[in-house]
Image: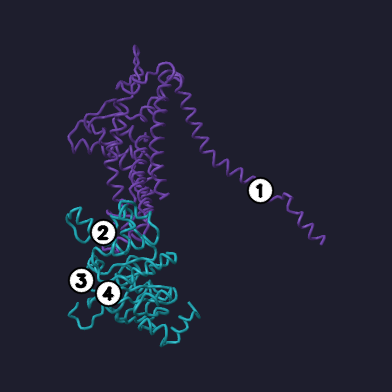
Amino acid sequence: MITSNKNFAIETKNLNLWYGTFQALFDVNLQIKEGQITSLIGPSGCGKSTLLRSINRINERLGYVRIDGDIEVFNKNVYDADVALVQLRKQVGMVFQRPNPLPGSIRENVLYGHKLHKPGKITRHQQDEIVEKALSQVLLWDKVKDHLNRPASGLSLEEQQKLCIARLLPVQPKILLMDEPCSALDPAGTAAVEELIWELRGEYTILIVTHNMAQARRASEECIFMLMGEVVEHSLTSELFVTPQSTKTADYIEGRYG
Amino acid sequence: MTTQSNQLASFDQRDKEWYIDKAIQIIVFMSGISAILFVVGIFAFVTMEGFGFLLKDFSISEFLLSPWWEPTDEDEPTYGILALVAGTASVTGLAMLVAVPFSLGAAIYIGEFASGKKREYLKILIELLAAIPSVVWGFIGLTIMNPLIIAVFDVPVGLNVLNAGIILGLMAAPIMTSIAEDALKAVPDRYREAAEALGATRWQVIYKTVLPAAKNGLLGAVLLGVGRGFGETMAVLMATGHAINIPGSVFDPVRALTATIAAELGETAVGSTHYEALFTIGIFLFLITFIINLTADLIVRGIRKQ
């Protein structure tokens, strides 16, 4: 991956996607840089979540999704026949719109992914280290260290969302996909999770869908504007919001629709 | 102005719609509580019929601990239900051994793997299976299982715990499947999505996430099956061999509590001790199935609340 001269983490090539007969994505060509935070904005129904969810192929759960074109993650098309979904999802973690901690304790949540991908016994001590490291990285350790065995569902939404990020980290993904990770949170929670996402920049390639333009502006380095299943504009966040190239983008960021 | 004040006054008049609405409220309320009234009424009737026995001849230690059910003995009739309880329990236990893997497997397949049309057809089929009358199952026990068991295991009689257990297990499996499938469906989809996005395989999603989350509902399904087993009459009457016996192996014939009532009640004099003793068995059965069903219900309700 490092040897590759074009350090893109994700690349889509002429990506078209249909739900049944409805076409949701039209010829999407994108290049997402490694180690950056890229935000995807656009009005609801523009295909930004669809695009995100087809990168780790979680969209396939629906059963009636058809795809044409390539999505390359580190130069490997994830729709190739020889791709193992389990390995793909180990590399590409996902955070959902509503915090979705698994049933079970905080500790079990953090260790869930690790147990899937690294089968075999590890000592209690090693487990403790993994839990502490992951929870510290999401700035949650101090708050929950004394009740790791409590059910994760008892946490506040903000803490749940942080936990959902924390449980991705022990399997050491390269890419984090985030689907409106703050939309269920209050302003304080949003600020806290945004701060966390900003902290993770560099170590992970982060692609974040948001309907909140202020958030995209604050918390991303590059920004992609989508409309009706097409990519309208992809540029540096600082440029897109100041000097948008397309009038559609300009209209959207000024709030004329969406 | 005057018309307005007329209009204001008009809403204290009860019109036809008001009376219809009231009447329907009362009818719906009556229908709602009638189920409770019937249950209480039946329990009261059964208790009253068995009451004479409970007062006069009833000895709790003999009733529960004696294996001798000899109500027609001329010198010294005994009313011990231990052998009957053993019969019912052994048949139900074996039935659960048969039904749990079948119904759990079917529920997992229907709930987690089958999709679209296949799933709908299977669900309809399961409902149809649940609707097969128990006498038909008993008939299968008599005419198919009986010779089959004799041939396969080389035993003299094929009407025994094994026969009744298998028949009852197959009988209880559809309803258990249906309830277990509901329990699996009640597990929020975001759990599956979360587990899958973390890289769990389909099987890992099921056994690490879905089954633990649904365990109360699944337990409820099993308990309802047990309740069904305790209460089932006709099929066990036909398939157990109907011999009073504490079974030593699955090839021993037994007799069930329910079957005893069904077989003997018609031949006793109303009001006789034997008649009253049968009703006492009825009370006993009623209490046991009530407790089992209540437990199952509370467990299932517990998961709904979560």
Numbered mark located on residue A82 in the image: 3
Q: Which type of secondary structure does the marked residue at label 1 adopt?
A: helix
Q: Which type of secondary structure does the marked residue at label 4 adopt?
A: loop
Residue depth check, mark 4 versus mark 1: number of the one nearer the observer:
4
Q: Which type of secondary structure does the marked residue at label 2 adopt?
A: helix
Q: Residues within 10 Å of mark 1 (few under 14, many from 20)?
A: few
Colour pattern of the rendering: by chain
| Chain to which the residue tagged by mark 2 belongs | A
Q: Are marks 2 and 3 in contact (CB under 8 Å)?
A: no
According to the image, label 1 marks what residue?
B20
How much space separates mark 4 and mark 2, taking CA atoms? 21 Å
| Chain to which the residue tagged by mark 4 belongs | A
Most foreground residue, B181 or A230: A230
How much space separates mark 4 and mark 1, taking CA atoms? 71 Å
Rendering colour (chain B): purple
Tell if the residue under mark 4 belongs to the same chain as the one under mark 1: no
Residue B270 point in image, percent of width and height: 46, 21
B45 shown above or below A83:
above
Q: Residues within 10 Å of mark 4 (few under 14, many from 20)?
A: few
Q: Residue furthest top?
A: B75
Q: Residue furthest front?
A: A142
Tell if the residue under mark 3 belongs to the same chain as the one under mark 1: no
- Which residue does the image show at 19% across and 37% down from the upper left? B151
Residue B154 point in image, percent of width and height: 17, 34
How much space separates mark 2 and mark 1, taking CA atoms? 67 Å
Tell if the residue under mark 3 belongs to the same chain as the one under mark 4: yes
- Which residue does the image show at 50% across and 81% down from the upper left? A256
According to the image, label 4 marks what residue?
A202
Rendering colour (chain A): cyan
The count of marks equals: 4
**Three-letter amino acid code of the residue under disc 2:** Glu
Numbered mark located on residue A132 in the image: 2
